[in-house]
Image (cartoon, rainbow, N blue to C red):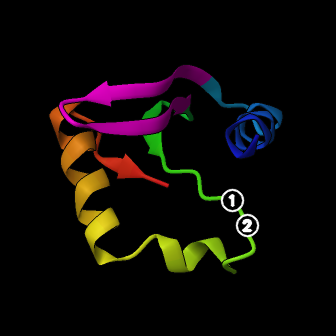
Amino acid sequence: MGEQIAAAFLIERGATILARNVRVGRGELDLIVALDGEVIAVEVKSATAAGDPMYHFDDDKQRQVRSLARQRRISRID
């Protein structure tokens, strides 16, 4: 559900959803969008009983998402 909400939010702001749940090797990029002439990988984290979703985007997850995005030749991650 978090990805649907994120996609709707981005679309309202002019983004085009290019792909969802893109498998890259053993990982996955949640959303790939086009916005203002850029292709952007979007990592979606939803609030849970465990607390703020930002705490679940730790250094290891950041490295993984950056690596997956580079493999797809995407330089921006949101």
Return the residue found at the far front: 49
Return the residue found at the far top: 18
Q: Residues within 10 Å of mark 1 (few under 14, many from 20)?
A: some
Residue annotated with mark 1: 46
The Cα atoms of the two marked residues, 1 and 2, are separated by 4 Å
Please state the horizontal and vertical placement of residue 41, each as a whole percent of the image. Answer: 43, 41
Q: Quadrant of residue 51?
A: bottom right
Mark 2: secondary structure: loop
Amino acid type at image mark 2: Ala
Please state the horizontal and vertical placement of residue 8, each as a whole percent of the image. Answer: 80, 34
- Name the residue at 21% across, 33% down: 73
Label 2 near label 1: C-beta < 8 Å? yes
Q: Is residue 74 left or right of residue 44?
A: left
Q: Is residue 63 left or right of residue 31?
A: left
Residue 74 or residue 2, whichever sits in front: 2
Please state the horizontal and vertical placement of residue 9, each as a whole percent of the image. Answer: 79, 42
Q: What segment carries the magenta color?
A: 17-34
Residue 23 or residue 33, whichever sits in front: 23
- Name the residue at 77% across, 39% down: 13
Q: Quadrant of residue 45?
A: bottom right
- Name the residue at 25% across, 30% down: 24
- Vertically, is 40 above or below 46? above
27 drawn magenta = yes
- Name the residue at 53% across, 30% down: 33
28 drawn magenta = yes
Mark 1: secondary structure: loop
Residue 67 or residue 56, whichever sits in front: 56
Q: Quadrant of the N terminus?
A: top right
Secondary structure that dominates the magenta span: strand
Residue 47: mark = 2
